[in-house]
Image: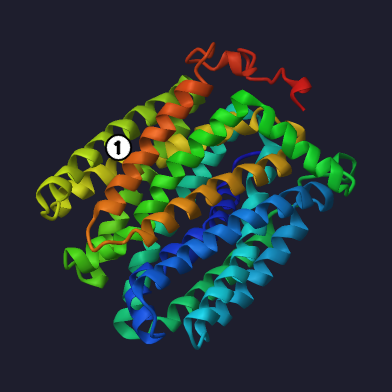
Amino acid sequence: MPVSFPLLITLGLLSALTPFAIDMYLPSIPAIAADLDAPVALAQLSVTVYLGVFAAAQLALGPLSDVLGRRWPVAAGLTVFALAAIACALAPDMTAMLWARAVQALGGAAVAVTIPALVRDLFERDDYARVMGLVMLVMGLAPLLAPSIGGLILLYGSWHWVFVGLLGITAVAAALFLALLPETLPPERRHPPALDRVLGNYWMLLRHRAALGYLLTGMASFGGMMVFIVNSPFVYIELHGVPAAWFGPLFGINIAAAMLFAWLNARWVPRWGAERLLRFGLTVQGAAALILLLVALPPVLLGVTAPLWLIALGAGAYIAMAGVVMGNAMAGFMAFFPRLAGTASAFAGAGRFGFGAVVGSVTSLLHDGTALPLLLGMAGCGLLAAGTYALLCCAGVPADGRALGRRPGGGEQRPGAE
């Protein structure tokens, strides 16, 4: 299938719904906490509640797309997501907000888990990495624009209108999806509904050592991003006094860098291969992790606040590599399971967002009025990603990735992996 601009926009916008749902209301977190008479830590927890439910739901919804096809799960997910956005806007207290966010995560999971499987239906490994890189480039507009949109809404209205804006974005995504995307999984390739088969497939994914290495690498890298997303509003707005309206542009600089490297990654994959680019991204993220560890020393040893420009430098280098690391790690994982794309996508999504929810929750609960949870959380995730890849993926795998089962011409030769 040709990679057309409308196709990329549609896939990117569908994939961006969850980033919009998370990032668009980040500047509103202090206002939501004050308006709903809840502590900031509980308002921050609304982010990780979304992520936790989002992760768990994918385990059920991913295999469902292998049974029903790709269109029905996406359509149902968009409907649930939109209704939950209305519930968030009308939430009278933090309990209602947390429940609404949990329901919204169910809809977001149905959409998000299906998109990688849909792309895997259409493209092989390096082409998959290239297309997913372009999708992530489009998707990157969400965290780039969302905090600024949310901050702008706060200038002229209350936080409730942030969720009204999210509802409008969902309506546009639904219209594009229904108009442009056909069913990509024909009936003869669908799996019969059987719980024992689903559980057996998950166990098989878990036992595949090399595939698990790619999955854990992407999970750890993504965890560092979640640490930044959950903790950066406090560090920027409360700790360093950045106005809420300026948080979006400062946050967006990091995402713009990630988008640039995602675009470069898509151009470089045909020449250098996904494996070599993954190693490059992990090297840069590992260096960024060491920078963040060094930035954490003054607060630990001297009790002084780390300067914002140093925090921004380390975090920016880390996040700039997000598209390179996560896109190519996902391509490495999915390449092992071409006939279980929905199940593999669900397993990867659940692991990635589940780990993100855990580290985001831990750093939120360890909130101590300093930047240390952000610094140490991101540093730990970056070093974990590099270490996991080195231990589980590097043995016998040259930089061109041929030991991953790709023939020099690009085809796969691992039918026995499933």
Q: Is residue 362 left or right of 313 when viewed as pictured?
A: right
Indicate the position of residue 371 as horizontal and vertical percent values: 24, 55
Indicate the position of residue 136 as horizontal and vertical percent values: 49, 46
Residue at point 46%, 40% (across, down): 220
Q: Is residue 40 left or right of 368 when viewed as pictured?
A: right
Q: Is residue 396 left or right of 202 when viewed as pictured?
A: left
User: Which structural element holds mark 1?
Assistant: helix
Kind of residue sitting beneath label 1: Ala
- Quarter of the rendering containing residue 118: top right
Residue 74 position (above or below residue 84): above
Q: Is residue 312 left or right of 117 when viewed as pictured?
A: left
User: Disc 1 marks which residue?
Assistant: 289
Residue at point 28%, 36% (across, down): 288
Give the camera-side residue of 282 and 185.
282
- Quarter of the rendering containing residue 54: bottom right
Indicate the position of residue 99 as horizontal and vertical percent values: 58, 75
Give the camera-side residue of 2 and 370.
370
Residue 127 position (above or below residue 121): above
Residue at point 57%, 81% (across, down): 86
Look at the image and tell me whether residue 103 can be seen.
yes
Category of crowding for the residue at label 1, using alpha-carbon neighbours closer than 10 angstroms: few (below 14), some (14–19), many (at least 20): many
Number of numbered discs overlaid on the protein picture: 1
Q: How is the image coloured?
A: rainbow
Look at the image and tell me whether residue 20 can be seen.
no
Indicate the position of residue 386 as horizontal and vertical percent values: 41, 29
Residue 189 position (above or below residue 368): above
Q: Quadrant of the C terminus?
A: top right
Q: Quadrant of the N terminus?
A: top right
Residue 108 position (above or below residue 11): below
Residue at point 50%, 38% (across, down): 218
